[in-house]
Image (cartoon, helix red, strand yellow):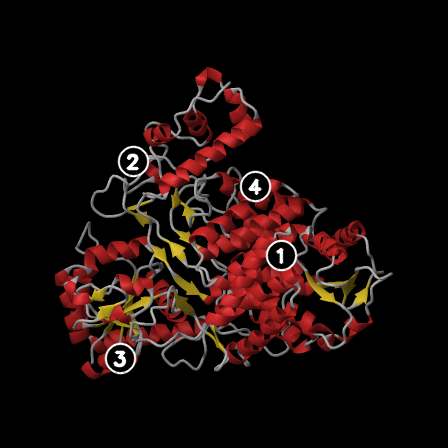
Amino acid sequence: MSMASGGEGPASSQHKHTNRLAKERSPYLLQHAHNPVDWYPWGQEAFQKAKTEDKPIFLSVGYSTCHWCHVMERESFEDEEIGKILSDNFVCIKLDREERPDVDKVYMTFVQATSGGGGWPMSVWLTPDLRPFIGGTYFPPRDHGGRPGFKTVLTRIIEQWQNNRPALESSGERILDALKKGTAITANPGESPPLAPDVANRCFQQLAHSYEEEYGGFRDAPKFPSPVNLMFLMSYWSVNRSTSEGVEALQMAMHTLRMMALGGIHDHVAQGFHRYSTDSSWHVPHFEKMLYDQAQLAVAYITAFQVSGEQFYAEVAKDVLRYVSRDLSDKSGGFYSAEDADSVPVSGGLGKREGAFCVWTTSEVRELLPDVVEGATGAATQADIFIHHYGVKEQGNVAPEQDPHGELQGQNVLIVRYSVELTAARFGITVEKANQLLASARAKMAEVRNTRPRPHLDSKMLASWNGLMLSAYARVGAVLGDEALLERAVQAANFLREHLWDAEHQIILRSCYRGDQMEVQQISPPIPGFLDDYAFIVCGLLDLYEATLQTEWLQWAEELQLRQDVLFWDDQGGGFFCSNPSDGTVLLQLKEDQDGAEPSANSVSASNLLRMSQYTGRQDWLQKSQQLLAAFSDRLTRVPIALPEMVRALMAQHYTLKQVVICGHKDAPDTASLLSAVNSIFLPYKVLMLTDGNPESFLCQRLPVLSSMVQLGGVATAYVCQDFTCSLPVTDPQELRRLLLDGTMDMQTQ
């Protein structure tokens, strides 16, 4: 079978094998388009073949920047013998988990329940009617150290399917039935959410118990950024400022954010954050960079700036967005998904290595930064100062236990070892001079890095992750009063509306692709969006409205929330299903009950519904938010550490959102001064709105009370209200700031 693949000309002239994945758009699926495996994408053609030929399905799930997915492809899926075994005995389906998180969640739930672990690549064997009966993750190609290899596993499954099929099917059926019961999340009629202060206190205690004091973070190793934990801790502090627990919560968040920014998980040369740290000191990362991490960390750092006033945190937030604007941005306004951890080393050689794009030898640093610094102690060079500051060592600064595969021997991962003040003192130069030299060095190193073979870029643009990034640009731009960032946020919202909103069918689409490869015939139709696509975009639009006060974004948020309710709301038990219940190919209707690398869409929706009720006056959205929280009561009460973002929504319900209403003209300087005062403070439980008194406006139509709010003496005026019972109006920004800060102190008594 020979097919043309996107932009490469006839596949047969370049590749020995080409399969159906060559007509797909997912970068991950295209990576497997030339395997000697008869791959199918997830869809009816594959399902029908399995039924017609009565063959089991082999489902392989991964994503394009997954290190062990690359390893399993090299070892097994590019192996001619294994490829023939797979193609002859199974219907082989390759799935991008980022395109189809609904399918991934179902089978990952099965794998975790049957093997006690999970991860990617995920390997699952299914009956022709899609019911799983065996599952696992990565398999080595051949038997090794008592562990069966992939070929052995395939042979055993073929034998079992031929000789013991009823037992396989029966076992899978029993497990699936148990999962359906075990994953049900529902509220009883009239059930109320749990008490917010109790849940929040328990969440804090659980985080404090797992907190690692020396370097921050919430386990020893590996260590993940976990922005959901950090945002909860800062929100917890905001209503417990005068308590020892509140102070401790803030210290935990700020110390973690500082140590991450100084660590090797932060890319000091090219900005942005890597996926996680393999050690407890944030030094040696897994070098993959994910869009969702950048989005959430930018928000966490700008929040830390609001809380502390320390410019350090604002600089890190801007640093993250510089990386995204440069390396993860499409000219259409969308954002790409990820950069890979692996790349070809500068020295060449066979294959890619993790981190090759990012690491340095001492000789490279010395060769690049040879100039002697005038006035420095001991005729030090710029390299000497850089090497001291970033912990560079002749033998490399990566310990063997941090590099189990030996890919980083002799290399250095940059990590800030000393403050700029200490570095300046060590070499007898001013702090200003040290900052200048370090910045110059980083710029030179960035130029050199750009000549190296780049890691693979996953240019897939996901609606959900673009929604998270929209929030980041809007919130950082609003806090800093940075028009360029706000313009980029508007560009992102326009991208979502133009490329991922099917206005005819009133649905969000899950993804689109760079150039969109529309010249390539596609096997698979566009994928309708899932719950997280709607929830994260609605949140992004609400943040964009508060940043720009352009009501078109509020209007679209309202439209999307209505569609989300129709498509995903569980009328029986409350809360939202992750995917549309009408899709018969998805065997489990799940409600995500964990705020992990990304927040649960139900957690975000609980806040969205509450915020939307304030902007529209719709009591049904307030009730839906309460029903949702009630459905997750058991999880919130027992292990709130699993849902810190939902605990924040529960706290917002309890403390009641403040309405900060500015009466004024949107572009007037006096309005801008009041808005700047609002944005300078971390107010996790508020909505911000602008009214010019026009009764025909979007907000006044929904909230007629706004029409009665007027400017005092013809100047912009602020009202701080709760349930639209308002304090006396103020026109002075400092007075507004005091009023808002006093209000946060009042929360502690509620």
Camera-nearest label, 4 or 3: 3
| In the image, residue 307 above or below residue 412 | below
Q: Is residue 31 left or right of residue 467?
A: left
The image's mark for residue 409 is 2
Residue at (34% x, 28% y) in the render: 367
Alpha carbon separation for disc pair 4 and 3: 53 Å
Alpha carbon separation for disc pair 1 and 4: 20 Å
Camera-nearest label, 3 or 1: 3
| In the image, residue 448 above or below residue 427 | below
The image's mark for residue 279 is none
The image quadrant where one finds the N terminus is: bottom left
**Residues at circles 2 and 3 in contact by the CB criterion of under 8 Å:** no
Camera-nearest label, 1 or 4: 4
The amino acid marked with disc number 2 is Gln
Q: Which residue is mark 3?
A: 45
Check disc 4 and report its element: helix, strand or loop.
helix
* Label 3 Cα neighbours within 10 Å, binned few <14 / some 14-19 / many ≥20: few
Q: Along the polypeptide, which appears first: circle 2 or circle 3?
A: 3
The amino acid marked with disc number 3 is Glu
Camera-nearest label, 4 or 2: 2
Q: Which residue is mark 4?
A: 255
Alpha carbon separation for disc pair 3 and 1: 49 Å
Q: Is residue 571 left or right of residue 441?
A: right
Camera-nearest label, 2 or 1: 2
Alpha carbon separation for disc pair 4 and 2: 30 Å
